Image (spheres, rainbow, N blue to C red):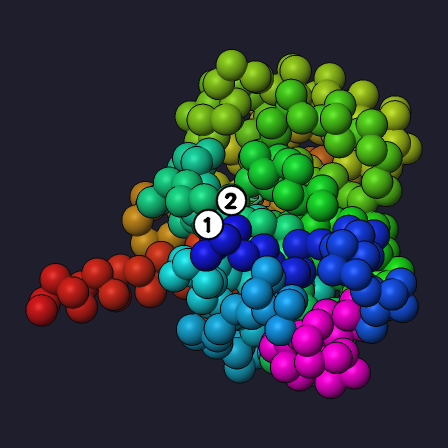
Amino acid sequence: MQDGKINLRDLLPEELSAALAELGQPAFRAGQVFDWLSRGAESFDGMTNLPKALRAALAERYYLGTPRVLKKQVSAGDGTIKYLWGLRDGNAVETVVMRYHYGNSVCISTQVGCRQGCAFCASTIGGLVRSLEPGEMLEEVMFSEKESGLKIGHIVLMGIGEPLDNFDNVIKFLRLVNHPKGMNIGMRHISLSTCGLTEKFDKLAELNLQLTLSVSLHAPDDETRTRIMPANRGRGVERLMDSCEAYFKKTGRRISFEYAMIDGVNDSPEQAALLARHAARVGAHVNLIPLNHVDESPLRPTPPERIAAFKKALEREGVNVTVRRRLGGDIDASCGQLRKKTADALRAGTERE
Ligand code: SAH
């Protein structure tokens, strides 16, 4: 909430109905307003089938969160689009639209910055600024679709931030974007990626949402994992695997492990063997990702031939494994980099002044 006003896009249809009833409106008004919201209306004045007095009453209590494009980059190679959105309070987040043979997918941020401190990740360098509200995450999807003209069918929560560190807002966003009267994107078309905040897994499993849970594993042993992912400290790989197994049993949904291949850090044959054991135990699919270079980090990607060998080693153990295709390599499409570079450039600008 800002200026004492509420973002109308934070409201589920049933909440909107209650809010309009409180304003003395007949029941059909909620449908009309939700219809405008679904079409990405940017002002109450544009809601032309509402009485003027109602438009004024809404504008007094609510606002329509509408992010502004601060930067847009389009990959010359594969058409991947990356947006840097300016939010109402002056913060900025990144959203990436990727084009696949099965349709268009959007990768959204869930927080401004991140407090998880992963050694290879650009999003965490300045720490956490704040969590995003449900409506702001919805706006990333809605306005990426509107601005690009590309129909969005899939969502991955793999942008800036840790979704399970913003649990309630993320769940409400999922309900908003999944709502049949809204964007109506199916839970099976949504992936949520986490660095492994195991204390939240049961709560998520309880909701039985049928989304895909991706676990950013990146190392199969505690020594390495704690070194590159501070979130492993106090939790540990064993507990993470217990939580994954429980999640799979409860929801019946196969988990996937994200594994960024880092030269000389997590790519040994012993680590392949241990990773295979974990994947077999929890029935996980493994997604190998060549590490994206981040300027501030000394870590380097594993060379392609050793990624291939690592993949073979996993396959020999019967693990279901893919190597993720890199999209948007020419536009800093791995998240966090655009926001960071823009902040750096702005800072350099002010320092020069
Ligand atoms: N906090 C969540 C989601 C955001 S990160 C999580 O940790 O899963 C999205 C994915 O990108 C994660 O798997 C993350 O580990 C990975 N990632 C971050 N920086 C990367 C880099 N430089 N190269 C490859 N993958 C990276």
Q: Residue type at mark 1: give it.
A: Val
Q: Position of residue 78 (x, y in %)?
A: 61, 76
Q: Are marks 1 and 2 in contact (CB under 8 Å)?
A: yes
Amino acid type for the residue under numbered disc 2? Ser
262 or 47: which is nearer to us?
Answer: 47
* Span colored in magenta: 33-55
Instruction: Compare residues 275 and 175 and report the one nearer the observer.
Output: 175
- On the image, the x and y values in percent for residue 307 come to 58, 46
Name which quarter of the figure residue 216 lies in: top right
Q: Is mark 2 within 8 Å of ligand 1?
A: no
Residue pictured at 67% horizontal, 26% vertical: 200
Where in the figure is residue 235, as x and y percent of width and height?
Answer: 57, 17
Which residue corresponds to mark 2? 131
Left/right placement of residue 30 relative to residue 5 reads right
Q: Is residue 266 visible?
A: yes
Closer to the camera, 201 or 143? Answer: 143
* Horizontal and vertical percent position of residue 215: 66, 36
Q: Is residue 36 above or below residue 209?
A: below
Q: Residue at x 56, y 34 (%)?
A: 165
The residue pinned by badge 1 equals 112
